[in-house]
Image: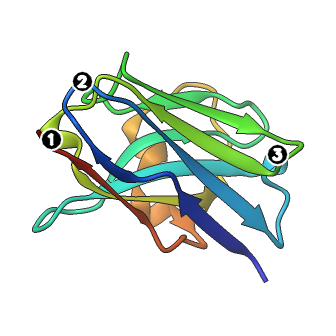
Amino acid sequence: QVQLVESGGGLVQPGGSLRLSCAASGVTLDVKGIGWFRQAPGKEREGVSCISRKTDAIYYADSVKGRFTISRDNDKNTVYLQMNSLEPDDTAVYYCAIGEWTWDRGSSWYCEAGKYHSWGQGTQVTVSS
């Protein structure tokens, strides 16, 4: 049974940093694509950053480009989202999920929530002073 577990969320002041983890069981992440998504109250779930299977091409949403970094640790079967220079608009529940698409140029099309499965339960990130 595939299970993803997110962790690392919390309350942080504007300008601060957090590192989210997405630990997997029942699946080997190094052969899969992975996406990080977020959903704020009253808003749709949006793709934040995604990694393609096979090519490891990466997509970042414009709103996080230059501030967030996605990475894999295949030995730990875990994917991370390093979030720096956090802003109040980053406040949301963050989710990871598995993708099956292979792509070599990042675009928002490959980081749409409907293309991912096996969602974790989410971790809350709150950016506030």
Left or right of residue 114, residue 63 in this image? left
N-term-proximal mark, 1 vs 3: 3
How many angstroms separate mark 1 from mark 3 (CA)? 31 Å
Of residues 110 and 78, the one drawn nearer to the viewer in this rendering: 78
How many angstroms separate mark 2 from mark 3 (CA)? 31 Å
Q: In this view, does 4 lie above or below 111?
A: below
Q: Where is residue 42 in the image (x, y as percent from the top left)?
A: 10, 68
Q: In this view, does 9 lie above or below 17?
A: below
For label 2, the residue is: 15
Would you identify the image quadrant in which residue 22 lies?
bottom right
Of residues 41 and 129, the one drawn nearer to the viewer in this rendering: 129
Query: Which circle, 1 or 2, is nearer the viewer?
Result: 2
Question: Would you say the residues marked 1 and 3 are in contact, meaning their CB atoms lie under 8 Å apart?
Answer: no
Q: Where is residue 14 in the image (x, y as percent from the top left)?
A: 19, 30
Q: Position of residue 122 (x, y in %)?
A: 44, 67
Residue 30, numbered circle: 3
Q: Quadrant of the C terminus?
A: top left
Q: Residues within 10 Å of mark 3 (few under 14, many from 20)?
A: some
- Secondary structure found at label 1: helix
Question: Would you say the residues marked 1 and 2 are in contact, meaning their CB atoms lie under 8 Å apart?
Answer: no
Q: Is residue 107 above or below residue 76?
A: above
Q: In this view, does 57 lie above or below 124?
A: above
Q: How crowded is mark 2: few (under 14 residues within 10 Å), some or many (20 or more)?
A: some
Residue 89, numbered circle: 1
Residue at left offset 61%, top offset 73%: 118
Would you identify the image quadrant in which residue 27 lies?
bottom right
